[in-house]
Image (cartoon, rainbow, N blue to C red):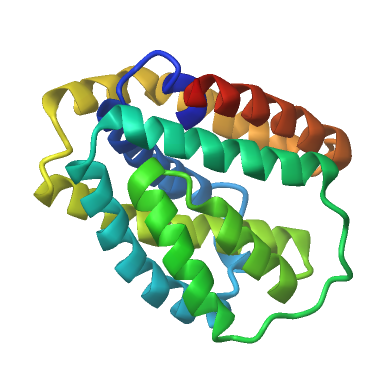
Amino acid sequence: MVPLLLMFLDMKLVVPTANSLAVLCGIFLLLTFQTRKWIRKDVLPMLIIGSVIGVILGTYVLASYESSLLKRLFGLFLSGYALKMLFGREQKERELKNYVGLIAGFLGGCLGGMFATGGPPVIIYLNSKIKDKQAFRATLIFYFLVVNTLQLVIYYYARLISRDVLKFTLYLVPALIIGNLAGSVMHIRINQILFNRIVALILLVTGVFLIF
């Protein structure tokens, strides 16, 4: 959502809107499909502690710097991540140490605060700790609900939550509900490799567009 909307709208509208929707999304998903019973709370403390620091730093950057510069930085990040998805070699999975969760949370918090896209570092960490697909999804949903709620509060104090943000958020809620229902049904059926490639290509094209 964020990279596509940034092609047309200002970052300081898109990022707080995406964060507001992320909170609604987390609440919706936790209340449906028995998501709560799969949460692995034992892996969350280190992630959340790191994220608190990262979100504060990322929000400061978002509030302090010009949107055009941040868009280019985001474009570089997207392009690099997309290329890794497309051409990166699969490495033998090994479980990461618990303290790595602190680093992953911090990096995810920074990216989340700046761009509302703090997923990659956290996904890499949780993927090494949780092998069950349902537990992985549920834990990720709960983590993002906690961090995005914190982020929303910090955005409010940083004066990034405006009337335009609230109106745009309400405008997008119907699409959010439809997308969540569709994704919850499809996530156990979709071909993961094909899905990853499609997402990577979209991110790559969008990232290049944002840079130039």
Picture coordinates of residue 89 (x, y %)?
A: 87, 54
Residue at horizontal 82 percent and vertical 50 percent from the top: 88
In this view, 178 is above or below 16: above
Tally of marks? 0
Q: Residue furthest top?
A: 8
Decide which of 38, 102 is in the foreground and name it: 102
Of residues 82 and 161, the one drawn nearer to the viewer in this rendering: 82
- Residue visible at 80% across and 44% down? 188
Residue at the front extreme?
212
Q: Is residue 152 left or right of residue 45?
A: left
User: Can the viewer see residue 1?
Assistant: no
Instruction: Determine the residue positioned at 59% across, 86% down.
Output: 98
| Residue at the spot 87% in from the left edge and 65% down from the top edge | 91
Q: In front here: 3 or 79?
A: 79
Q: Nearer the viewer, residue 58 or 184?
A: 58
- Horizontal and vertical percent position of residue 79: 62, 36
Choose top left, top right, bottom left or bottom right for residue 5: top left
Viewed as shown, does residue 64 lie left or right of 88? left
The percent coordinates of residue 192 (x first, y second) are 83, 41
Residue 178 seen in render: yes
- In x, y percent, where is residue 50? 40, 73
Q: Is residue 50 left or right of residue 78?
A: left
